[in-house]
Amino acid sequence: MAAGTVRRRLAPTPVSFGAPVATRCRHLPPAPCPLPSSAERLHSLAIHILRRVRVEDGAAGLSAPRLSALSVIVYAGPITAGQLARAEQVRPPTVTRLVQALVRAGLVRRRRDRRDARVVRLEATAAGARLLATARRRRVRALAGELDQLSRRERRALREALDALERRFPREAPRSAPSAGRRRQ
């Protein structure tokens, strides 16, 4: 290997869908490539579940980014545009465009902070909260239909796993400022 050359290994990547996930490694520092860990499996599964139920979001009439921003505003609002940008992990100009579209649609309103008039907070309108609640019900109904296909024993195991995960990852208080990467739903 030439001086200055960096050895890389492949990151674990799903190879197949449906059956147990096989992995191959790509673009990580040199190390043995392990079989999928529980964290890798959970991460991949969470993404696939959300993609599957996200199909229901088309009925809401909003793009995925707008629906996501509305969700943060409904569950964590009233919040500032900066807090929304951090929660959505996007740059401020992106949030500005999202918020403008949500305001034009009558789903979000801007309000001056009562304690500091320089601060503008975003809050969902009644129409925005209703639209999000309806979209969430569609997603949950679709997911429930999938879970109904599990056996009684599998549903019990799922409930136990969910209990453990909820203990490890408690939900944030509804009025707290959102932290990047965590969703309130």
Image (spheres, grey):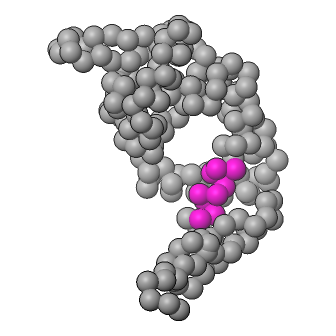
Q: Residue 131: where, in percent of width, then height?
A: 61, 16
Q: Residue at x 69, y 72 (%)?
A: 23
Count of numbered labels shown in the rendering:
0
As drawn, which residue projects farthest toward the bottom? 1
For this rendering, which residue is in front, 174 or 80?
80
User: Which residue is found at the position 53% from the left and 92% from the top?
Assistant: 1
- Let me know if residue 46 is in the magenta part: yes
179, above or below 124, in the image: below
Q: In terms of image quadrants, where is residue 27?
A: bottom right
Q: Is residue 28 toward the left or the right of residue 121 in the image?
A: right
Residue drawn at the location 56% of the way across and 25% of the way down: 66
Q: Residue 22: horizontal and vertical position, in percent?
A: 73, 72
Left or right: residue 165 versus residue 22 is: left
Rendered image quadrant of residue 56: top right
Q: Main secondary structure of the magenta part?
A: helix
Outermost residue to the left = 115
Confirm whether residue 179 shows in the render.
Answer: yes
What are the residue bounds of the magenta stretch? Answer: 40-48
Q: Residue at x 36, y 20 (%)?
A: 78
- The answer to whether residue 71 of the structure is visible from this angle is no
